[in-house]
Amino acid sequence: MKEKKIFIFKTLNLLWIIILYHIIGTKNIFLYILSLSLYNIFSASFDQITIKEILNRLHTEQTKKKILKIMLLIISVISMLFLILSTLISDTISIFLKLNAILPIFMIMGITIIIKPLIRLLSEYLTNINNNRIYSKLPMIYTFFDKVLVLIIAFINFRLFKNSASIGVAILYLSKIISAILIIYCLYLIRKHGKDIKYNYAGNDRINYQKEIKNILTNNSYKSITKIVKYSYYYISVIILYLVLSTRYNFKLDELGNIITFTYFFALEVMDYLIYIAKSITNRLPKDTPVTDKLYNSFKMMLTITIIFGIISPLTCKVIFNDPSKSIYLTMVNFMSIFILLFDITYDSIKNKSITYISLIIGLITKIVLVIPLINSFYRMGYNLIYGDVLSTSIAMFTSVIINYIYLRNLNKEKDKYFTKILDILYDNIILAIILVILEFIIPLNTKNYFASLGLIIVYIAISITYIIIKNKIKNKKRG
């Protein structure tokens, strides 16, 4: 049931990103991506903070409420520090990137950082002390309100009033504030018309608050740090691309803003959906499946998906975004999605904090060191400069994956010869790529008709699935 809900949520999020693209059109919302990338980094700091476990162990309502108050105070202080940091970062960015009027955007963004963790903690507290399970759905309701309001505000901003980019982006963050107000109003209605709260007063609580709060803040903190580093890759890319391409290569600012926005927002969200599909299939493997086997299965699956969508990316961009010219950027992110998937799987599997931190630091340093040289190299070779940035992220993530893989393989004392498996995966996908390239000569992809594009996508995917089924049957017969 949980998987079904996640699938619905991911599908709705994909639909949301498509609708938002068509609402905004060619408007430059680079400042939104610039601030949102930083928001994701700060927000990831709170992702693993939960009081659900400790509330289940406590008995008295007084102790539970005190835990909630302490955590709300801590989150408020941290959020205030993030707000100050956001302001300082906005000043620094405005100087280096020569951007004007970005302080209000970063200030409003900084104010909204506290909302998501606050609602999650309130949800866990109210769910614990109340018989009404609707409280557990508050974070989901908040996300729904936020997504809908972003679409409404974007339409009003960019379609009706046609506000400037800086004003329009600042107003977009109001969706989070209004959503929080709606959640508070929903709580008022539930408390007014719902059942009375029933507390459990049985037993006494002997609790070391300092120890418990420390556990809440540090438990699974390495997972939050992993997310922070992952989002930092994207933030570094956004900053470096804008700085290098605007100053050294004289890109027009509107054009550059649109390229970065599409690559690190719209295309990344589309690929996130495909990554989720690949993860869902991998998660169906038996629980005792070795991590290395999961990695190879994921690599095999994602490489196939990457080849298929790499070939049909012009059609995909036509159907989803009504702009085939954006296919080059979708293809780049499509390639990077292989390494994002492997990155996620290894860090989900590894439990050693020291190895986690070492691999994260090495990967991040690799990204910082390689990004500008690779951008310059692709310029000299006459290729799109975004290739250099995407390749730097892919190499950095792959470096971290290799370190984690070596540790996991040694930990599990696996002696299988996976080199043969890698060759099989490459062999199978090279054949698939050749089939699709030959098919491209027979059934060209250069169509401007929407329904023809949709039909061609179905044909190419159907042929790819047919090849995979036939290939698997032949292999099963050989094994039999």
Image: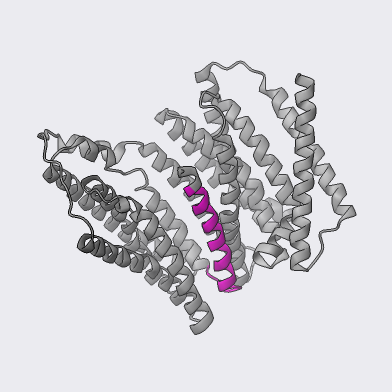
Residue name at image x 79 percent, y 35 percent: 470
Colouring mode (rainbow / by chain / secondary structure / one colour): one colour
Q: Nearer the viewer, residue 95 or 348?
A: 348
Residue name at image x 78 percent, y 41 percent: 466
Give the answer, above or below, for where 215 lies relative to 183.
above
Residue name at image x 15 percent, y 41 percent: 200
Residue 14 lies in magenta, yes or no? yes
Q: Nearer the viewer, residue 292 or 339?
A: 292
Residue 24 lies in magenta, yes or no? yes
Quadrant showing the C terminus: top right
> What residue range appears in magenta?
5-29
Residue 467 picture location, percent across and down = 79, 39
* Lateral position of residue 350 relative to residue 82, left or right: right
* Quarter occupied by residue 21: bottom right
- Determine if residue 326 is in view: no
Residue 420 picture location, percent across and down = 72, 23
